[in-house]
Image (tube, rainbow, N blue to C red):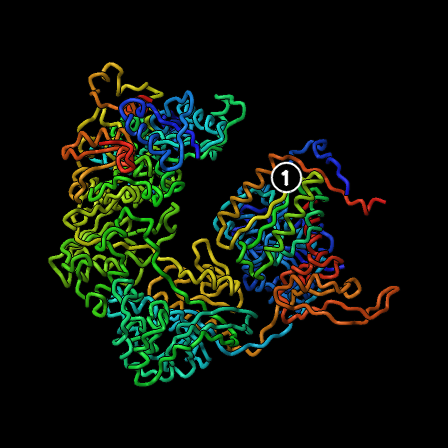
Amino acid sequence: MQIEKTAHAAENKEWKPMIVAFCCNWCSYAGADLAGSSRLSYPADVKIIRVPCSCRVNPMFILRAFERGADGVIICGCHPGDCHYTTGNYYTRRRMALLFSMLDFIGVENGRTRVEWVSAAEGAKFSATMNEFTAKIRSLGENVRLGDLRCRN
Amino acid sequence: MTKAEKQAELIRDISGVDPYKCMKCGKCTATCPSYAEMDIKPHQFVSFVIRGEIEALTKSRSLEKCLSCFACIERCPRSVEPGRLIDAARQLAARERGGGFLTTEEVPEMCDPDTPSQLLVSAYRRYRR
Amino acid sequence: MKYSYFPGCTLKNKASSLDRYARECAPLLGFELCELPEWQCCGGVYPLGRDETATKLSSVRALAAARSEGRDLVTLCSACHHVIKRVNDDMKNVEEIRTSANNYLALDEPYRGETNVLHYLEVLRDVVGFENVKKQVKNPLKGKKIGAYYGCLLLRPSGVMAFDDPEDPTILEDFIRAIGAEPVIYPYRNECCGGYVSLKDRELSRGMADKVEASASGFGTEMLITACPLCLYNLKKSKAALPVYYFTELLAEALGVAKDS
Amino acid sequence: MQRIGVFVCHCGSNIAATVDVKRVVECARLEPGVVFAEDYQYMCSEAGQMKIADAIKREGLTGVVVCSCSPRMHEATFRKCAEGAGLNPYMLEIANIREQCSWIHKDMETATEKAVVLMRAAVAKVNLNVPLKSGESRVTKRALVIGGGIAGIQTALDIAEAGYEVDIVEKTPSIGGRMAQLDKTFPTLDCSACILTPKMVEAAAHEKIRIFTYSEVEKVTGFVGDFTVDIRKKARSVDIDKCTGCGVCQEKCPSKTAKSEFNRGLSKRSAIYTPFAQAVPNVPVIDREHCIKFKTGKCGVCSKVCPAGAIDYEMRDEIITEKYGAIVAATGFDMISLDKYDEYAYKKSPDVITSLELERIMNAAGPTGGHLERLSDGKPPKNIVFIQCVGSRCADKRGKSYCSKICCMYTAKHAMLIRDKYPDTNVTVFYIDVRTPGKNFDEFYRRAVEEYHVNYIKGQVGKVLPQPDGTLLVQGADIIDGRQVLINADMVVLAAAIEPDPTARKLATMLTASIDTNGFLTEAHPKLRPVESPTAGIFLSGVCQGPKDIPETVSQAGAAAVKVIGLLSKDKLLTNPCTAKADELMCNGCSACANVCPYGAISYEDREVRGIGVREVRRVAVVNGALCQGCGACTVACPSGAMDLFGFSNRQITAEVDAICR
């Protein structure tokens, strides 16, 4: 891994954060849909990727996102105890705690990564979470860019 | 923004109350011990703020009659808590006109040998702010 | 056990018995009240407005002083307790107030709500335990029917005060049982006595105190106890003229600290 | 290389008003693999689907992206359409540009940009899609209904009538539920027991229905069509086959201190008891906490007097395991605790009661024999005050945010019945709003006002103050007339909010069914799939899904039954093909995947592995496609990257990430 600063500012374009949200199919994706049908807006910077369960999110996907210039990654799953697959979100919680501290160590601050539980009935929470997360990313500014050294030599 | 609108916003800001959460159940009015003395009733405070009739609010007798007993705050089912609006209106009134309801000159004759200093301090603070 | 102690202005003159007996009883119950040096008035009322800072500063000073002594802060007067407890909550949880208060005070170390604020009654209930208070009682007040008068400030708003169930409190009743008397439950025990309005609007506050006393005596109360000098003042002015005491006066009597009250 | 078609839906103006669909189409044409793109008013309409089917055939498409509403809405529709046109359904993906784009953004430029990105991600994914084939699983032709109230009884009866076997599990000693506790029902005022007990008897007598009372569901495993459920039959201490229901034991039982649950604690019952006279089954249980025999070892009166020899003190809890194709949750409701609402003096005065307690007091079989009287002194009340919305519609921590829905109507009923039977009693109702949507409901409420002169006051009550003379001073507001109202009442009735039965939460976890912030079970779609849980094979009946009255509950019970019947009528179910699979070449048989699999779907086999430079017999992971539910936990646990998930493969998700971060 290697870190470099992006040359975005040089392009003289207004910086917009790039945020990837992984949402589990059963709770959080449905919560996002409910936010939509309730017209509870959140910034367009957030783009959702649907996964069957939050535990499907491989740390590799998150590293890849940061490698490709993402400024923040958020993972949303069912509330603890409510996982459609019984225990998936517990794995997510543990895996991400490790990953996030490692990311923080290499320069991707903790504020850029987050795990949040959003149920299918919590459209309002989904929207509020995304607004808040985007605001946080905006306040942190542009992210460092991770690089995959394996492909360099 | 008109002056009234600005004041309404200020009241909402100072009090932290969202008047739109009120469902007009009247529990504050039902619970208020000073109800009979008030010209604007506790449940009407939100409507005055929503309509922006702040002038009427800051001139209201209710500001002096509210006991700050927090009963409406405790029992409000919508967490609107009209007592906070009343205190914000008092604050606004005091800032604009200065406290006029209680003057220093009249205090000595209101006291008796048992009057606790706590009474003077709190009356001063509530009436004059 | 030592506690920092904030007496408040009234306890130094009109309500001196509330203060004196509290101090004198404490050692018998295994704790000590250490008065804060150079304390100032708590402010008397808690300003609800979110942009009010100056009126909260003296409470912050008391809280910070207790922090530097490394002790919990004990209060007695209901109003002081209310104000200090709520300001402490603001300092802990409301960022704007914390920042602006600290900017004013410029303490060596910013105050962030670290001090634990306790009412004397909470110490009796949660630290000493009413069972242990009962064990120390020498002159139980047998057969006395006592009505607890809570008023507003100890109980509300319950979210911050967290003193007792705001609609069905039991702490003073448990206290009354501990000193050997019989508590009387009456519905006005947590309704307002008239508060500060009694200074300028006597009729209004008198009406409220009358209701409290009428209800209390209707249920057979022989005397009322309270923790608030202003409540005591207002209740004493009412028609029914029930005897009204500070709870510490009865505590002192039961523990044999005071000869008569 | 795929040949992908992109179809962008306008959804009338739902999408087209905020997203420039033409531009999405133009951008789509530039994406790798895309050979065709077009837009249309309503893609989900028949004409829209025809366009997709035609294009698949005409252009020889190997993959399809539909930019439209949420896949939760129409993914199945479009996949079926693709299948009809000869394309494997799993070669189609949805880009959600409505719920997650046009509906939440206002600015056309921003929304269009985002829609394009979402389209690109979907195209990138489809480029890597492979045809998938569903497996088949069997259907156990028996249903389980959890909860034996009116909802559960009706669901069970409807399923049984269609010829399928049904088991009802009820935690109390009798079926009947809340409805059995009611006196009269609105808006017809017919007697609750008269319409409920025949249904209880019918259920008990039905040859397709088994009833397990005094039983609870303990464990649920499996999936739609093939659930395995452990049911704990609590020790009844009475042999259900021997007992004749004569009732002598209850009469002679010397322990009569327990509070009757059925009478809401307003009367006492014996330690051996049936909750009420018409209980089904009419077989008592011994409440071991109150039974003298169980507490001290001495007594045994019931055993001595039982003519059938049915008493069995040695009886133990029994676990039975049964298979089911479908499960219906019908766990019902309870009233909230009023401990935190003592401004209404519920804890302080016996004459402040809840509406459900009033039902018992008004009921001829209740604690007062149907006489309306004060519980403090047995006197008939002359002034009664009803308080609505106690704990409903609250935004604070004490109460519930929702409207409990049934209180306005039952209060009108109570008021009317009291005024009818005791015309010299004054009845006042404090309300915030009177909500009476329903057939003949508003007419009913108006009758209470117009015919029975019930005094309706718009406003809440601030405090109920018990007086020394035993009356209750009610201090309320009349916000229409603008005054504070003081009423000296003899009785106060609180319309306490209803909440889902506390068992629902535990059950939801067992069923992996989702639950909302209020503890109600969530439906798969609030409008279009109101009786199904998002978890396949789990159905919802009655108040466990949300507040509702009896007619609504019965309708929903029937609807849930129809869904169950539809499921059980199938011989085979198609399984989800999006399952995990291990790459044998990369797998080193470490067991990390099996350790995280919640379904026990992964086992290990010794297989001959052939690759470049490799040819050996090795222990590798094998996924049972019928058991795998496709969560993907194993794919992340796998240290060597051998495990992957069909439909959501590592490469597919990475491609989506790349497309979004471009």
Residue for badge 1:
A17
- Residue D436 showing in the rendered view: yes
- Residue drawn at x 15%, y 55% is D453
**Above/below status of A86 relative to D214:** above
Residue nearest the viewer, comparing D54 with D479: D479
Residue A115, horizontal then vertical, whole percent: 59, 48
Q: Under tag 1, what secondary structure? A: loop
Picture quarter with the C terminus of chain C = top left
Q: Chain of mark 1?
A: A
Furthest-top residue in view?
B105
Vertical relation: D195 (above or below) D360 = below
Residue closest to the eye, D329 or B50: D329
Q: Position of residue D365 (x, y in %)?
A: 23, 70
Image coords of residue D298 (percent x, y): 33, 74
Image quadrant assignment for residue C162: top left
Foreground of the two, D500 or D271: D271
The residue under label 1 is which amino acid type? Pro
